[in-house]
């Protein structure tokens, strides 16, 4: 499971130790599959939107940091996030829905 996490999250290094993989301990234990709400977002045509959503969630929803990390204008970020909401039917203002999206994006890389 740690090896799967290391492949999915390069920041963990080429060899990940179980205690160091954090939330991936839970994600690797879940059965495979994609949550239906996120399936369309994970289609190759929407790869940039999925990446935007993941970076946004990784940066705790901080628009300025996310836009800087992606090298885009904040208005572009807001547009992309609205497209993510349209594609998924999730409301990024709702914590549980953000959590679902974040977990689904991370587990899709496993």
Image: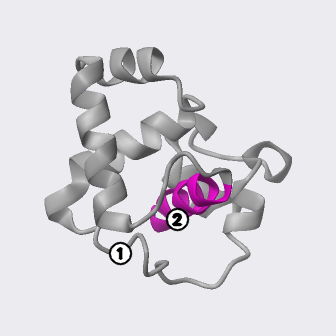
Residue at the image position 52 percent from the left and 65 percent from the top:
104
Q: Position of residue 18 (x, y in %)?
A: 81, 53
Q: Main secondary structure of the magenta part?
A: helix
Q: Position of residue 63 (x, y in %)?
A: 44, 22
Kind of element beneath mark 2: helix
From what the image shows, is residue 32 above or below residue 45? below
Q: Position of residue 87 (x, y in %)?
A: 29, 64
**Residue in front for this viewpoint, 48 or 97:** 97
Magenta part of the chain: 96-110
Which residue is labeled 1 in the image? 39
Kind of element beneath mark 1: loop
Name the quadrant of the N terminus: bottom right
Q: Which mark is residue 28?
A: none
Which residue is labeled 2 in the image? 104
In magenta stretch: residue 31: no
Q: Residue furthest right?
A: 19
Q: Position of residue 65 (x, y in %)?
A: 46, 16
On screen, residue 67 versus residue 31, left or right, reads left
Residue at the image position 46 percent from the left and 35 percent from the top:
56
**Residue in front for this viewpoint, 92 or 55:** 92
Mark 2 burial class by Cα count in 10 Å: few <14, some 14-19, many 20+: many
Residue at the image position 52 percent from the left and 23 percent from the top:
62
On screen, residue 74 versus residue 6, left or right, reads left
């Amino acid at each position: 499971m740690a090896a799967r996490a290391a492949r999915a999250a390069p920041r963990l290094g080429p060899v990940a130790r179980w205690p160091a993989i954090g939330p991936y301990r839970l994600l690797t234990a879940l059965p495979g599959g994609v949550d239906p709400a996120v399936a369309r977002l994970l289609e190759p045509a929407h790869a940039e939107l999925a990446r935007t959503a993941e970076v946004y969630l990784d940066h705790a929803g901080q628009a300025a940091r996310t836009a800087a990390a992606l090298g885009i204008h904040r208005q572009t970020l807001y547009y992309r996030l609205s497209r993510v909401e349209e594609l998924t039917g999730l409301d990024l203002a709702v914590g549980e829905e953000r959590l679902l999206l974040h977990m689904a994006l991370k587990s899709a890389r496993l």
